[in-house]
Amino acid sequence: MFNDIGALELVTIVVLAILVFGPDKLPKVIQDVTGVIRKIRAFSDSAKQDIRSELGPEFKDFEFEDLNPKTFIRKQLSENEDLKEIRTSFDLRKELNDVTDAVNSKETDSAAAAGGPSATPAAAGPDLLKKPAAPAADQRARFDADAT
């Protein structure tokens, strides 16, 4: 619960507690706080047991930590056999390299067919990877500042 509290923060909390409650009342306050924490934990455990008993035997492996989306996805990815097969059979780098090789071979083939090695890719067709030039001012759609 308090995994990220360091020594300096702990000393600061103790000094503040002594200043606020005084050394005489501090043990009683600590007992009261620990008692409240125990009651909250007992209530939480009781609620978890009630939920598990209401869900039935088909949810006997249910853990409340699985309600966290990251934990749920990690568990599903590690346990699902179909997803393991897909992950092992699909190599994204290989697929991207194949597509890149196919695109590069088409460019060199079309350059050779269009006029040899000095032909540019623009002669082969429009370059779809480049951003198109902005249209002229008279071709642009009108902008209505009041409509936005």
Image (cartoon, helix red, strand yellow):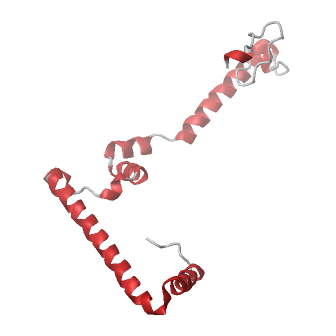
In the image, residue 109 lies at what x, y percent? Answer: 71, 20
In the image, residue 69 lies at what x, y percent? Answer: 41, 49
Residue at 53%, 72% in the rendered image: 4
In the image, residue 105 lies at what x, y percent? Answer: 68, 25
Q: Is residue 107 above or below residue 11?
A: above
Q: Is residue 70 above or below residue 15?
A: above
Residue at 78%, 20% in the rendered image: 121
Query: Which image quadrant: the C terminus?
Result: top right
Q: How many marks?
A: 0
In the image, residue 72 lies at what x, y percent? Answer: 37, 51
Image-quadrant location for residue 123: top right
Q: Is residue 135 above or below residue 131?
A: above
Which of 27/75 is in front? 27
Which of 54/38 is in front? 38
Q: Residue furthest bottom?
A: 24
Image-quadrant location for residue 94: top right
Image position of 121 (left or right of 7): right
Image position of 128 (left or right of 96): right
Q: Residue furthest top?
A: 138
Residue at 30%, 75% in the rendered image: 38
Q: Is residue 23 above or below residue 119?
A: below
Image-quadrant location for residue 145: top right
